[in-house]
Amino acid sequence: MSSPSFWLHSLGPIERRPALPGDTAVDVAIAGGGYTGLWTAYYLSVLDPALRIAVLEKEFCGFGASGRNGGWCSALFPAKVTPAMQAALDDTVDEVGRVAEAEGIDCHYAKAGTVSLARTPAQLRRARRSPRFVDARTARGICGASHVLGGIYHPECAVVHPARLVRGLADAVARRGVAVHEGTTVTGLAPGAVTTSHGTVRAGVVVRALEGYTATLPGHRRALVPLYSLMLATEPLPAADWERIGLARRETFSDERHLIVYGQRTADDRLAFGGRGAPYHFGSRVEPAYDRVPRVFEALRRTLTEMFGIDPPIAYRWGGPLGVPRDWHPSVGLRDGTAWAGGYVGDGVAAANLAGRTLADLILRRDTDRTRLPWVGHRSRRWEPEPLRWLGVNAGLKATAAKDTWEGRGRR
């Protein structure tokens, strides 16, 4: 597969927009053409159509995690949240659907919630602590996996075709007059300027929206760890399989294991299923070869078989990096003309929209409920230098997998 994911492959050939033609000046320069950068550009252009905005993307919009993820537009967050933050995230799930409809973006949006299954006694003990706990019958009625003992159901989650969303969003901002330059590598960020492979962009505000690729920038190698997540997509499954699997309203699903897995039923009746387990690479390196780890793909296939009693033909395999801060706490902020957002730890489809709206408020100096949320201005300490970073992250991954193995054998 020449495309980075099933989602992008399903769109057919992608025609890149022209690269930056040379040195230029704008009001806001955004490094990164994924969800964060494009949502920021979108809301800025809505709130102040006169702004000169440039989005700078090395490959094409959606090449990174925005075009490769599991398609969960959820109110989930990797860190502890306040009631105000949770309310903002809940609202964001609907906001994504609203904008998609308003802009004519057919991203297969369907809001039916998400279920995390408890399939071992240890998982059940954890699930029972949640106020959203549901019993085994209810959980199995949503997702007919094996050994279901209960689960956690969260209604604030929609399923999307992520590449349709990000490419449609790029079209929407371009229609609003935003300059979207693809094939333009950002080589450096500084207050007032973004240097690229095609020239320098002077700007009143510079936005860093690179997520899993942040570590490729000089001076940012220890800001976010690029941790890889890998996915499979099956061929379309027959109706008899779906009668047993469920997901009738296209709910998303996972279970309560520690080494995360996640899945959805696509609009064309495939199972798209992913998980962690790929190694972290020394020096926070990001390379195309790291997108494919055969042992992880095989583990994902085995997990599908174990969960649903099927051995489906696998049509697509892919992966990519996501951004992980040292304290697993996403953040958004603006300081001295430099703005940033990210560190979503894989929960970024909805959070990036909230980040884009928040950055637009901060850049335009609008005092809103969003600018007072606790992630605004949050600073995570930097990751340890190598080799401590490599040792620590990979040891953590192995320990997490071992813990799941022990729990599966009935051990605490």
Image: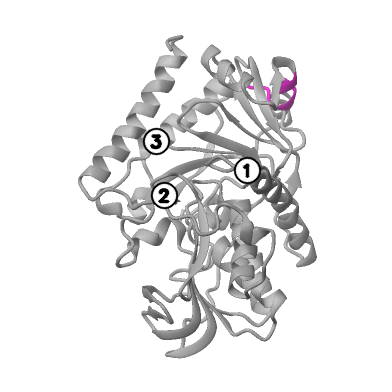
In the picture provided, is 228 more to the left or to the right than 359?
A: left
Decide if residue 190 is in sight here. Answer: yes
Residue to which mark 3 is pinned: 277
Boundaries of the magenta span: 138-145
Alpha carbon separation for disc pair 1 and 2: 19 Å
The circle drawn on residue 129 is none
| Main secondary structure type of the part rendered in magenta | helix
Alpha carbon separation for disc pair 1 and 3: 30 Å
Q: Which of disc 3 and disc 2 is earlier in sequence?
A: 3
Please name the residue shown 56% across and 36% down the image: 262
Residue 91 sits inside the magenta stretch = no
User: x and y percent of residue 410 in the render?
Assistant: 46, 9
Residue to which mark 2 is pinned: 325
Q: Which of disc 2 and disc 1 is earlier in sequence?
A: 1
* Labels 1, 3: front one: 1
In the picture provided, is 407 more to the left or to the right than 177?
A: left
Q: How is the image coloured?
A: one colour
Image quarter (top left, top right, bottom left or bottom right) of the C terminus: top left
- Secondary structure at badge 3 equals loop
Q: Choose between 39 and 15: the one closer to the eye.
A: 39
As shown in the figure, which amino acid type bears the numbered disc 2? Pro
Disc 3: CA contacts within 10 A as few (<14), some (14-19) or many (>=20): many
